[in-house]
Structures are given as C-alpha cells and as structure tokens.
Image (cartoon, helix red, strand yellow):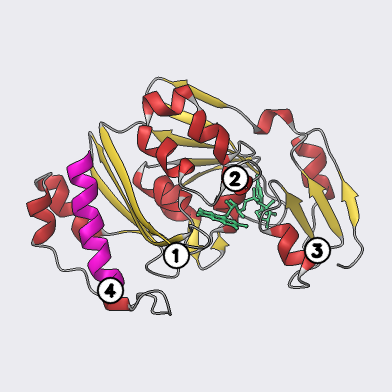
Amino acid sequence: MKTFNYHSPKETKEATKLASSNSVFLAGGMTTIPSMKLGLASYKDVINIKGIKKLSGIKVSGKTLKIGATTKHAEVAQSKEVKKSIPSLAALAEGIGDPQVRNRGTIGGSIANNDPAADYPSACIALNATIHTDRRKIDADKFFRGMFETCLKTGEIIESIEFEIPAKSNYQKFPNPASRYAIVGVYVAKHKGGVNVAVTGAKSCAYNDKDLSSALTKNFSSSAVQNVRVSPSGMNSDIHASAEYRANMVKVFAKKAVEAC
Ligand SMILES: Cc1cc2nc3c(=O)[nH]c(=O)nc-3n(C[C@H](O)[C@H](O)[C@H](O)COP(=O)(O)OP(=O)(O)OC[C@H]3O[C@@H](n4cnc5c(N)ncnc54)[C@H](O)[C@@H]3O)c2cc1C
C-alpha cells in the first residue's frame, strides 16, 4: 500500500475542504481498503468521514424514511423504524455480504461506489429516493450513471438518503454464493403514483424496468408480469449467468416480489 495522508474531520465542511481529485472518503472502507491494499487504487489523502456525527442515523418523518450516509448495513437491518416503515429495505440490508461487511459497510459508501451488483441502488430507484449531498438534492433516477459511476462531483459528500415509504414493497435476489452481491436482484415498490420495478446485477448499472413498472401499475399481479417480454439485450453474461438466464430471472423475481408484497 502506498503512503497517504490520513484525516479525520468532525464536520462535513472540513471534509469537503480536504477533498481533491486525488482523495477518497473513507466510510466503511469495505471497497476502498481492499482496493488500496491490492494496489488497484492509491490516494494522496484518505478522509475518514465516520467521525462526522450528522452523517449517521435513521429518521421517519411523515411519508419518508431518511438514513444518514454513514449508517451501517447492520443498523438498517436491525432498525425498528426501518422494519416498520419499509420492511423490504431492512431485509435487503440483512442480505448484504456477511456479518463483518454489514457491520462496517455503509449505505452512503454503497451508493457512491455504485457497484453494478450492489443491492441499495435498486432500493433507491424503486423507492423514489432523494440523495441529499452537502450541496444539492438528487433524484435516484438521475444519480446512478453507469458502472461504478454516479453524478457526484469531486469532493461532494452524500449526507443522507431519503426514501418514499411505499404502500407495498419486496426485494428478491439471487445472491452470488461467495460475496452475496446480486447476480440479479429485483425491487418492486407500489406507491400511490405507480409501481417501480428496479433491477440490479443484470446490466452495468441498476435501472427501472419501464415495461414491468408500467404493466404492474395497470394491474398489480404476477400474471401482469407474465405478459411482459424482458430482453436479454445489454445484459451481463459471465461465469455465473448468461444474459438470457438473467433476463429470465428478472421476470421470475418480479413475479415472486409481487406475490410476496
Ligand atoms: C466481501 C464483500 C461482500 C459484499 N457483499 C455485498 C452485497 O451482498 N451487496 C451489496 O450491495 N454490497 C456488498 N458489498 C459492498 C459493501 O457492502 C459496501 O457497501 C461497499 O463496499 C462500500 O461501502 P463502504 O461504506 O465500505 O464504502 P468505502 O469503501 O469506505 O467507500 C467506497 C467509495 O464511496 C465513497 N464514499 C463513501 N461514503 C461516501 C459519502 N458519504 N459521500 C460520497 N462518497 C462516499 C468513497 O469515496 C469511495 O470512493 C460487499 C463488500 C465486500 C467486501
């Protein structure tokens, strides 16, 4: 590992001042530390943001659930507020990695990293989330840009993620047996304004399947899913699953999620 300057700011402003194109924020470190140890990434400044109190915590207010960026997966999984307001989100958090990963990894780190197989991006899209940063609010459908790419600017810090509480929701995934990342994950959420079917693991970035969402908005039943064609075009194909297999899984999991709602 190359040498670097280590910082531990107590305020967001202090953290953003330290940031540059050659720095990284350290949240759970579950991606950053292995990347640095393996020599895949190196930074001049490592800015630990876990000491910034305002970045953590869980709060329900009215129709939304707000989770601070440095809140760990285990905290989301165990939270009474999350279990009561959006049980599918608590279940998603419980299905991430293993106990060690869940007790270090954070929701902000997960969405900033935007791994194509990560679970939270699908939740953000399905639950019409708003990403609050130190400088703006971003709708989830504009936040995730591509593989490991978001619309965050250099030094921009995610402060919290605000989810719309749905009438019904469920998340289904086929986990990679080693890492538990999603080979395919499908998050179905029924809101007053319509249904979202967000998919992760299938393409280079999580996305809202417009055809499934529109079919389920008209008729919220597993038979409505049956009539939708999910194309394998543009889907990932690797040693775990072909594009055709993934396309079929999207449909199977959309049905399962509707039935479990
Ligand atoms: C063995 C293993 C298994 C895993 N399994 C799963 C799984 O099943 N499902 C899943 O979804 N994920 C999984 N993960 C990912 C893990 O859960 C973490 O969410 C992820 O590694 C990044 O979160 P972190 O808090 O550790 O971020 P870090 O590693 O600390 O940071 C990652 C990136 O995010 C940026 N960042 C962090 N916080 C912020 C912020 N507040 N604002 C702006 N930028 C920020 C950093 O600058 C860095 O670029 C797994 C990871 C491992 C190592």
Q: Nearer the viewer, mark 1 or mark 4?
A: 4
- Cα distance, mark 3 to mark 1? 25 Å
Disc 4 residue type (three-letter): Tyr
Q: Please report the bounds of the magenta region as a residue range.
A: 245-261
Which of the numbered marks, if any, corresponds to residue 205? 1
Disc 3 residue type (three-letter): Asn
Q: Residue at x 63, y 46 (%)?
A: 100
Ligand 1 near label 4 (Cβ, under 8 Å)? no
Q: Which one is earlier in the sequence, the residue at label 3 or at label 4?
A: 3
The residue tagged 4 is 245
Q: Does the residue at mark 1 contact the one at mark 4 (Cβ under 8 Å)?
A: no
Q: Nearer the viewer, mark 3 or mark 1?
A: 1
Q: Does the residue at mark 3 contact the one at mark 4 (Cβ under 8 Å)?
A: no
Q: Is residue 82 magenta?
A: no
Q: Nearer the viewer, mark 2 or mark 4?
A: 4
The x and y percentages for residue 101 are 61, 48
